[in-house]
Image (spheres, coloured by chain):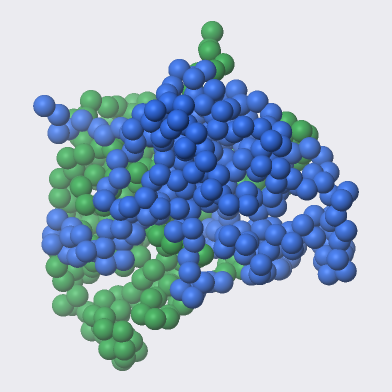
Chain colours: A blue, B green
Amino acid sequence: MTDPNAATELRILGIGGFPEVRPGADIAAMVGDRLVAAGLAPEAGDVLVVTHKVISKAEGQLVDLDTVEASPFARRYAEAWDKDPRQVEVVLRQSRRISRMERGIIIAETAHGFVCANAGVDASNVAPGVVCLLPEDPDRSAAAIRDRLGERFGVAPGVIVSDSFGRAWRNGIVNVAIGVAGLAPLADYRGKHDPAGYELRASILAIGDELAAAAELVMHKLEGRPVALIRGYLPPVNTPAGTGRDLVMDPAKDLYR
Amino acid sequence: MTDPNAATELRILGIGGFPEVRPGADIAAMVGDRLVAAGLAPEAGDVLVVTHKVISKAEGQLVDLDTVEASPFARRYAEAWDKDPRQVEVVLRQSRRISRMERGIIIAETAHGFVCANAGVDASNVAPGVVCLLPEDPDRSAAAIRDRLGERFGVAPGVIVSDSFGRAWRNGIVNVAIGVAGLAPLADYRGKHDPAGYELRASILAIGDELAAAAELVMHKLEGRPVALIRGYLPPVNTPAGTGRDLVMDPAKDLYR
């Protein structure tokens, strides 16, 4: 019998020792190898969170700034704000729309529909003179890792590809899910009733983003720990599996574009 | 010797069996009792996340709608969008500024500076005809719980008071930290260098919000589990303890008010 007082437990395991990732690397194999080295194998219900950076590198989503010719617009903006004009050019090429361009900050909407600083273009944890882009299709990247791990271990974990995004209204960046495979990114409570009988009308929890945020707590930025395994998560409502795109607000509904 | 391949582990423990909370209830005592019932006592570095709802109830932050007279503005808006005019009135009274008021959605800035739907006024998990407000000072609430648990157990955990907020650009709500005591809500990586020697310039992680989001994964909305204990979290950088206000963006810097 279960003790009704016992705590429910979720474990977040930070997987260390990840080697440097080069273009063409087999990320699913590397993740699997690191799980084995840590004495772990996927179990039913596990969720694996993988920082997009290692996936972008493996997929060759890197741009050598020496190969980039900045447009006049990028050059003017870069000069005004003391930026590298070639990096500004890459940001513009990754953007389908600029949401804000103020005080040297570019908040852009990417081809995927994500709204984030610099369209996700980032110079950290890559070689000098190189910038890293978001994966072309983070949902496809997540699904590929999930499938490969399923083949190898017989159990396919849910997979989230994460990045750290800024927010409106709040300081600091948080990890969010930009790619999702094999799990429900949203938990839809609408139509459920609370213990007092009140019908919840607006409660859709962004579980995918909460799982990504939780994983960041063991990843840290500077320690080569780009993968976390979340074990013991029980979805609260029966919502079908989906993709990272489910977390992107329809522009027609967005009051803050 | 530590195995370099071993996973680092964070545990999130959902504390169940919380009784119904009435105005005047001693939340710190209730939380302590539930920890004891679960066989847990705070350890150094633990973070306790408490849903604001139980704190608001204990602090009497409840409004009986029968006592509210709606203003002409509230009545007109409520009629246009099929809302309870008294509840709209309470939302307006909790707002110091309306950010958006479209399609029946009110995004408001509260007296605390939070930007959220309905200024945090909520009718779920309270008696019919009653709405719940945010705590008057969630940082004070968090500090009081921390102090009381420290007296009782000899170890004071970090405490976060949480609520679920919507976001710009992304679907679904996520748990965030509206009150913080005894921990650093932000992890400031600026000036640190990545393994390639690149200096991080914009990386401030909103740890408080990530901890709150992680806790939500074991709380769920309908199961009377308003408290979670996070054990094993190691702050990545040495940032001083702060408050929930540190997570609120200065309006002068906010591009999306």
Residue name at image x 38 percent, y 46 percent? A183
Q: Is residue A32 above or below residue B171?
A: above
- Left-right relation of B127 to B108: left
Residue A160, position in %: x, y?
48, 43
Q: Residue at x 13, y 62 (%)?
A: A197
Give the quarter of the image for residue A101: bottom right
Residue visible at 39% across and 58% down? B173
- Figure quadrant of the N terminus of chain A: top left
Q: Is residue B25 visible?
A: yes
Residue B114 position within the rendered picture, expressed as x and y whole percent measured from the top left = 45, 63
Q: Is residue B151 left or right of residue A130?
A: left
How many discs appear? 0
The location of residue A3, given as percent across then percent down, is 15, 29
User: Quick one: B174 or A232, which is closer to the camera?
Assistant: A232
Residue B26 in picture, x, y percent from top left: 21, 46
Residue lying at the far top in this picture: please name it: B1
Residue nearest the viewer, comparing A17 with B133? A17
Tell me which corner region of the image, top left, top right, bottom left or bottom right, holds residue B4. Answer: top right
Residue occupying the far front of the picture: A151
- Residue ID at (43%, 72%): B108
Q: Is residue A85 above or below residue B2?
A: below
Q: Toward the viewer: A157 or B125? A: A157
Please state, as top left, top right, bottom left or bottom right, where the C terminus of chain A lies in the image.
bottom right
| Residue B165, visible in the rendered structure | no
